[in-house]
Amino acid sequence: MPHHVVRRLVLIGLMVVVAALITVINPVFLTSGNLLKLLQEAAQTGIIAVGFTFVMITAGIDMSIGGVVAVTSMVCINFLHYTKVPVPMLAAISLLVGATTGFINGWFITRHKLPEFIVTLATRSILMGLALVIAVKDSAGFVQNVYIQNEGYLWFGSQGAFGIYRTTFAFILLGVGAQVFLRHTRTGTNIYATGANPTAAKLSGIDTDRTTIGVYMFSGVCASIAAVFISSRMMTAMPELGIGSEMDVIASVVIGGTAFSGGTGDVWGTMLGALFLALIKNGILKTGISPWIQPIAIGGIIVITVIVDVWQKRASERRAAKAKLRRLEAEAAAAAAAVQAV
């Protein structure tokens, strides 16, 4: 059975066990209202994580996603507060914010060969400041908490069919579409090749620079999509919205099986990772454990997952080396037998 299949089965089994333990402690966990909320929380992180998965498959990292969420939400608040721009146009403008940020990140990374972490961390800092600059302020210059009353915009954060939040529907559609794109298109193959071995990918004719810029643009777009749904759900937004969400996103992607070294992983795993993380966070609250434990738990999960990945990679390399040695020994034995026969 393939390694990634085993990993997902283990993750699903672990989720079942954790859910059962939480239910024993607090039966409220299994109520429909709580489960729908849990799915919504997973979707909000998962939408960003889908784009982040593409970046990590290319062996990159995007630390600017929290800043994109903050700026996008502030752009939306400004348009809703000062103008009467139709919601579809506002949504398009929001996606443009993320795409532009992603293009700038990708351009600096590919054009000037700068480290991905440094570029996106700098972009994050700039976006955090920009979110404060463009935030709606009162006459004294203090940031104003603007409540969203536009029914068209609030539609994104409301419940749809069967009481399921539209955020969840968007997450599922985005995840399925992204997985199909990764596995069944030439561009998806180029993304994997760029992450596995960029030099070999270039020699084979793949435009790795264009591929890199594309995945960062997609990551920015996903962060902007999440910003629309989050601000709609909250019916307001502040400049710090989304800041600090990077750890949750990284945890979801890593738990799902995408390696920092690039070339492996997919969206199915990320979707399971986002669901598992939401389960852990929801369980911490439902069992009465202090919410301050959440970042400790998330950090621990990331460390354990990376350790397991490194161990499995080394074990796989040892098995491959032993198999190659046995094959060489068999070929040498066959050659010796042939010489003796002559």
Image (cartoon, rainbow, N blue to C red):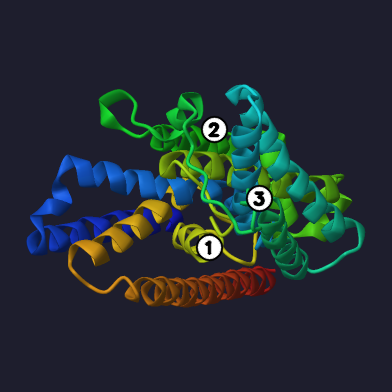
Depicted 3 relative to depicted 171: above or below: below
Q: Is residue 301 left or right of residue 329?
A: left
Q: Is residue 166 above or below residue 144?
A: above
Q: Is residue 26 left or right of residue 223?
A: left
Q: Is residue 230 left or right of residue 281?
A: right
Q: Which mark is residue 250?
A: 1
The amino acid beneath tag 3 is Val
Q: Secondary structure at mark 3?
A: helix
Residue that carries the numbered disc 3 in the rendered image: 71
User: Which image quarter: residue 159?
Assistant: top left
Identified by mark 2, the residue type is Gly
Identified at 75% across, 62% down, the residue is 126
Numbered circles on residues, count: 3
Quick check: 178 above or below 4?
Answer: above
Where does label 2 land, which residue? 177
Q: Amino acid at mark 1?
A: Ile
| Callout 3 crowding tier (Cα within 10 Å): few <14, some 14–19, many ≥20 | many
**Is disc 1 surrounded by few (<14), some (14 to 19) or many (20+) residues within 10 Å?**
many
The disc, 3 or 2, on the residue closer to the chain's N-terminal end is 3
Q: Residue 233 location, x and y as percent? A: 42, 41
Task: Decide if residue 201 is in sight here.
Answer: no
How packed mark 2 is, by other alpha carbons closer than 10 Å (few <14, some 14-19, many 20 or more), is few
